[in-house]
Image (cartoon, rainbow, N blue to C red):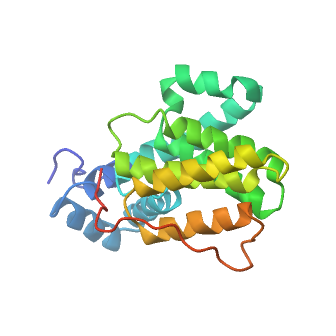
Amino acid sequence: MSGPGIPADGDHLELADVAALLGRDDPPARLCRHLAAVCTICGEQLRRAEALMQRFRHWNPEVAVVEGLAADGLLDTLLATGSKSWASQVEKEADLQTWGVAWAALERARAILAREAEGHALKLALLAAKIAGHLGTVYHPDWIADLKALAHAAAAAATPPSNADSRLRQVAAATAALQKGTGDQAVAQEVGELLARAFGGSAGGRRAEEPTVRHNRRRRI
């Protein structure tokens, strides 16, 4: 049996095949999981696809795989340049205007925050917010809003207390974006924890009151 995204007899699923099949409604997605269950090589490709979906927190396997595989390399190339040019490069280069690159920047910002090193985390969080602001119509606006909320909340957490005005602007941006998002309570909790840190809390301390979000707005892009 063969066809678009379906391997011919004797062939194994490539990672792109897995992503294409998982992104379709049954039976292609079910067929993909069946092949992965009976073939070690195909099973490994499925695990790679699922790991990318989990890391980049995107429901669409093709977006997670295509953008996820390229994200770290693109971000590393950008970060190797002067930070003063990051914003202008994001505005000019379409390859940087992806969910994958934005999420990779946010991921690194939060990793630095976890090590109590706010300085570089602020630049990365602002970079993630900048990229999120340039995501195109291929992405659902509710999901973009969630990403913006997390990025601005991370920026607020990384802003020094001496720069109170800037921190409050990031808090306001995070709260406004969250109100436009999917209503995912896990996102609201993460935003709340980051904002708690911005106002003197910590990941291991008390949790801030979670921002109020609308419910029943979770949709796929």
Rendered location of residue 44, percent (x, y):
45, 64
Quarter residue 36 falls in: bottom left
Is residue 216 visible in the rendered structure shown here? yes
Q: Measuring from the top left, give residue 29's x and y in whole percent.
A: 23, 62
From the viewer's perspective, is 75 left or right of 38? right
Q: Residue 59 falls in which quadrant of the image? A: bottom left
Please name whichever residue, 30 or 138, is drawn nearer the observer in this view of the structure.
138
Q: Is residue 216 left or right of residue 121?
A: left
| Residue visible at 48% across and 70% down in the picture | 186
25 with respect to 11 (left or right): left
At a point 69% along the width and 43% down the height, the residue shown is 124
| Residue 78 vs residue 92, the one in the foreground | 92
Q: Position of residue 19 (x, y in %)?
A: 34, 52
Q: Residue at 22% across / 67% down in the picture?
A: 30
What x and y, as percent, mark residue 151? 59, 50
Q: Quadrant of the N terminus?
A: bottom left
Q: Count every numbered label the image shows and give the total.
A: 0
Q: Is residue 108 visible?
A: no
Residue 84 sits above or below residue 213 on the image: above
